[in-house]
Amino acid sequence: MQFTSIILALCLSSFAVAKGHEKNGTAVSSGIIGKTEEGSTHDNSDKTEKKENKKCHEMSRLTSLVNLVNNATKLNELETKHNLTAAKITELKAKAANATTRLTELQSNTTLTSHCAIVDAGQKLMRQCKQMKMLTNLMAVADNATALSEMAVKKQWSAEETAKFKAHAANATAKLTKLQSNTTLVNACETIKKTAKNQNSASISQSDAGRLVGNMLFALVMGGIVSFFMA
């Protein structure tokens, strides 16, 4: 409920499109921040957001480290997989202990955690959209004998490899059907796709695109997709 309130509060205010993480440049993966003015205010907002995004990444990394050390099963699996010595394990635990202090400090900043929640939700949405696109393309090839034959020739697949591809596609059908049955998700992915295109167009400003994404997030909250993000 708290997470929903965070997004809803942001959606009810003015929106601006975040520039996005440099790694993926997506329309919403860097989250949404408040409306900025022209000139230095906008520049300062961008700098602030970049710093916050960097801290979000740090918080995610530290959380993973602490969770790993606190999970005996996962820690044992890591130790076995990488042949870690007792000294290395001790070193890892020491790093996790130090990370806990820093993590507590970051998590105490409610403004930062709210921002990171939006970032995480946007990133998860983007992953779901990309997965749906990948599975759709996979099924398009698997269900088309000509396309499948051309793919096999291009990739120089053996009969066994082609059979494995078809089996993989068959297993992916259920996952794709589940994703496509969520009309809110499908509509959100389409909106993001259009927004990304509009951002590269001179006919629409950043603020216009920001309002479009803001409206999309508002619809996601009202449509109950927040629970989908957090699943």
Image (tube, rainbow, N blue to C red):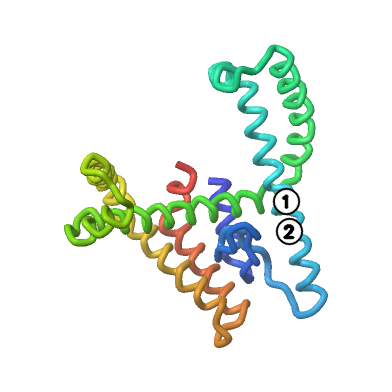
Please, what is the three-letter code of the amino acid marked with disc 1?
Lys
Please, what is the three-letter code of the amino acid marked with disc 2?
Lys
Q: Quadrant of the C terminus?
A: top left
Q: Please tell me in which quadrant of the rendered image residue 61 appears.
A: top right
Residue 228 image offset from top left, x and y in percent: 43, 48
Q: Please tell me in which quadrant of the rendered image residue 98 appears.
A: top right
4 vs 191, nearest the viewer: 191
Q: Which mark is residue 50?
A: 2
Position of 30 compared to 187: left or right? right
Residue found 61% across the figure and 26% down from its top = 68
Note whether 51 is above or below 99 in the view shown.
Answer: below
Residue found 55% across the figure and 87% down from its top = 203
The answer to whether residue 174 is seen in the rendering is no
Residue found 82% across the figure and 75% down from its top = 40
Q: Which residue is identified by label 1?
A: 54
The answer to whether residue 200 is seen in the rendering is yes
Residue found 68% across the figure and 71% down from its top = 35
Secondary-structure class at tag 1: helix
Note whether 61 is above or below 184 in the view shown.
Answer: above
111 vs 96, nearest the viewer: 96
Position of 52 compared to 222: left or right? right
Question: Residues at badges 2 and 1 in contact (C-beta under 8 Å)?
Answer: yes
Secondary-structure class at tag 2: helix
118 vs 81, nearest the viewer: 81
Distance, label 2 to label 1, CA atoms, is 6 Å
Position of 143 compared to 155: left or right? left
Residue 227 image offset from top left, x and y in percent: 45, 47
Residue 224 image offset from top left, x and y in percent: 42, 53
